[in-house]
Image (cartoon, grey):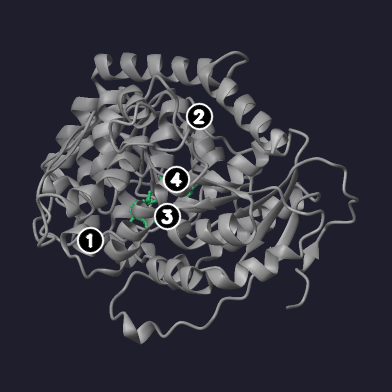
Amino acid sequence: MAPPEMLSSGEQDRGAPHVVFIPSAGMGHLFPFFRFITALSSHDVDISVVTVLPTVTTAEADHFAALFTALPRIRRINFNLLPLDASAFPGADPFFLRWESLRRSAHLLGPLLAGATPSMSAVITDVTLASQVIPIVKDELHLSCHILFPSSTTMLSVCAYFPTYLDGANADHVVSDVDVPGVRRFTKATLPQALHDPNNLFTKQFVANGRGFTKADGFLLNTFEALEPEAIAALRGGKVIPCFPPVFTVGPLKSMIPAESEKAGAGSPMAWLDEQPARSVVYVAFGNRCAVTLDQIREIAAGLEASSFRFLWVLKTTVVDREDTVELKDVLGDGFLERTQGRGLVTKAWVDQEAVLNHPAVGLFLSHSGWNSVLEAAVGGVPLLAWPRLGDHHVNATAMVSGGVGVWMEHWSWDGEDRLVSGEEIGEKLKEVMADETVRARVAKVREEAAKAVDEGGSTYRSMQEFVAKLKAN
Ligand code: UDP
Ligand code: UDP
């Protein structure tokens, strides 16, 4: 096997720990990696990042490029995947397919990483690769292996407990409500829909990964003590499953590197927000991979129009950004853009959401409850109106509500359901939550707690120090 391709290296072995990151795919998974890598790079640690090119989306490619440009000391280890016959998984989500390719190519990582210089001391990988990567890192390379979990700690409790649940009263593998010890009961409808089908590719990966958790050396969590105290305590106390590895709460993780596409210029959403009064704008966005149906898009448009609020709407009609070629005016219907000109801005482009949620003009966030979005709303102190669409969104919504970040529309439909939520209902709810001072006061408090956690001496600060000390002691 050829030695790893080390770009932007030129460094001698300084005796600092050398940490290799093995991320997976999807911006919701990559952002926590990029943010944690940026945070770790301010400590005396050598860092390499295993990178698979081409990425699934343009956003991923742009943000990998931004990371390596901003932090030239970080080495890139190119990883070529084995071909995967996608026709064996008809209709599978493109990100699940990429996770599967990574999982099936994981045995190539041992020889690839064994040649790394300076020699490696630790690996940090994504939960979607856990059951494949942990044995290679621990048994072949004899290194420590931590999992950076991209979702809520509440979701981690579900992932960790799910195999026990299946092995228990449920030998026929029929999924019903799941009572996670020490955390809460999740109704069947709250779980990722894919888990309802034991043969779904996601379910197979999810269960295999969950079974591998206790072999990890620890978990890095994008949360903070005040946000999810029960789930953190339940995992630490061994209530969810016995002998759960140590958990380090390192959130809220924040970006320090804007990608080229995020720079604010004239005509950008940030420039537009600068012109709007304080807390007047409803920000609407459903993450980087939720394709809302055309009919539902039209109802959202009607709701925004009926609410009379100013709005910034990041609209996506496909799961993969480079396939989104439709024209906004065709999607939104006759006259919407003209009628709302000046009052609203709709874009299909990537926006710097973190910056948007920190802008004083933003008063409410209509969101799918992707975990990065929840944390960004908490940091910005912007109330979140959760409309979960798929995957972990409902589980995150439970954590988001109990953590005090916002309100969850429990009866609004999922992706794949026939029922449309009407524009009238959306407009009414926007008005109600925009006017709700109690919700606003609670999220303002959460914002303070988030800031306290990362300040010197705070829970996140201490967790990060502990983790770095562990790396250096290895
Ligand atoms: N994001 C962004 N600009 C966009 C779309 C998404 O900055 O135009 C970011 C968003 O801020 C978040 C991440 O992409 O950090 C999406 O992750 P999340 O967990 O919220 O949802 P997912 O996309 O995984 O469903
Ligand atoms: N997940 C996991 N193990 C897996 C795959 C996913 O624990 O093998 C978790 C992960 O935290 C992810 C969540 O399940 O965020 C839901 O996955 P989803 O389908 O929503 O994909 P995503 O939106 O994260 O790309």
Q: Give the number of the disc on residue 380.
A: none
Q: Is mark 1 within 8 Å of ligand 2?
A: yes
Q: Give the number of the disc on residue 358.
A: 2
Q: Is residue 168 left or right of residue 452?
A: left
Q: Is mark 4 within 8 Å of ligand 2?
A: yes
Could you classify mark 4 by the number of other residues whose Cα lies within 10 Å: few (under 14), some (14-19), or many (20 or more)?
many
x, y (%) of residue 150?
Answer: 45, 45
Would you say residue 422 is visible in this rendering? no
Residue 420, picture quadrant? bottom left
Q: Earlier in the sequence, mark 1 or mark 3?
A: 1
Q: Nearer the viewer, mark 4 or mark 3?
A: 4
Task: Please identify the quadrant where the N terminus is shown.
Answer: bottom right
Q: Secondary structure at mark 3?
A: loop
Q: CA distance from mark 4 to mark 1?
A: 18 Å
Residue drawn at point x = 33 percent, y = 27 percent = 383
Residue drawn at point x = 52 percent, y = 44 percent = 32
Amino acid under disc 2: Asn
Q: Is mark 3 within 8 Å of ligand 1?
A: yes
Q: Earlier in the sequence, mark 4 or mark 3?
A: 4
The residue tagged 3 is: 288
Q: CA distance from mark 1 to mark 2?
A: 34 Å
The residue tagged 4 is: 150
Q: Nearer the viewer, mark 4 or mark 2?
A: 4
x, y (%) of residue 76?
Answer: 72, 60
x, y (%) of residue 213?
Answer: 41, 48
Establish if 103 lies above or below 2. above
Task: Please identify the quadrant where the C terminus is shown.
Answer: top right
Q: Are marks 1 and 2 in contact (CB under 8 Å)?
A: no
Q: Give the number of the disc on residue 194.
A: 1
